[in-house]
Image (spheres, grey):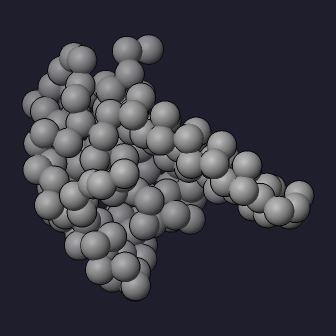
């Protein structure tokens, strides 16, 4: 599957939203409840991004964290959900993928990768590793998809 590196994708067109919300910050109603946690998680993301070995992922995360629309969405998520904060920090390199496609496309990709990995797993330990990755990633895209208006709940 050929894809442009995340940092080359125009963020304002990266996610197709069916109604007002992300990336239109004027229409985005969710706000951060815990501003202290929000600031701490965003700083941890910046540090985690700076430490990434993958240059494309490092550039993509840096671009996201400079985008006011993305910051508004992430602030709302991190300021209201300690769980999603921990999940995002556990897989910093994956976060830019959430803004490169719609939530539906991300879910389809996640399930396809999981199915392929499970088919190729040589033992139960290998299969469980892939299941844990999928379990960790599912809430990361579900949060922005719901809070940002990507999914019409």
Please state, as top left, top right, bottom left or bottom right, where the C terminus lies in the image. top left
The residue at the point 43 percent across, 39 percent down is: 106
Q: 118 and 77: which one is in front? A: 118
Q: Position of residue 36 (x, y in %)?
A: 40, 60
Q: Position of residue 3 (x, y in %)?
A: 27, 54
**34 to 93, vertically: above or below:** above
Residue 126 visible at all = yes
Q: Residue furthest right?
A: 124
Would residue 49 appear left or right of 80 to someone viewing this image? Answer: left
Residue 65 visible at all = no
Q: 69 and 39: which one is in front? A: 69
**58 to 67, vertically: above or below:** below
- Find residue 111 and report its image quarter: top right
Q: Position of residue 69 (x, y in %)?
A: 17, 45
The residue at the point 22 percent across, 29 percent down is: 16
- Find residue 27 and report its image quarter: top left
The residue at the point 29 percent across, 80 percent down is: 55
- Find residue 52 and report its image quarter: bottom left
Would residue 49 appear left or right of 133 to someone viewing this image? Answer: left
Q: 65 and 13: which one is in front? A: 13
The residue at the point 13 percent across, 39 percent down is: 13
Image mark count: 0
**24 to 6, vertically: above or below:** above
Q: Position of residue 148 (x, y in %)?
A: 31, 32
């Amino acid at each position: 599957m050929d894809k442009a590196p995340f940092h080359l994708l125009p963020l304002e067109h990266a996610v197709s939203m069916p109604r007002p919300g992300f990336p239109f910050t004027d229409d985005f109603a969710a706000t951060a409840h815990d501003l202290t946690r929000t600031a701490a998680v965003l700083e941890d993301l910046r540090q985690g991004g700076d430490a990434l070995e993958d240059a494309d992922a490092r550039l993509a995360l840096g671009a996201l964290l400079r985008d006011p629309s993305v910051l508004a969405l992430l602030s709302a998520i991190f300021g209201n959900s300690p769980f999603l904060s921990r999940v995002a920090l556990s897989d910093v390199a994956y976060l830019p993928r959430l803004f490169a496609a719609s939530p539906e496309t991300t879910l389809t990709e996640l399930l396809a990768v999981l199915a392929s990995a499970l088919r190729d797993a040589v033992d139960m330990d290998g299969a469980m590793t892939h299941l844990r990755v999928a379990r960790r990633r599912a809430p990361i895209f579900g949060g922005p998809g719901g809070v940002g208006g990507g999914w019409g709940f």
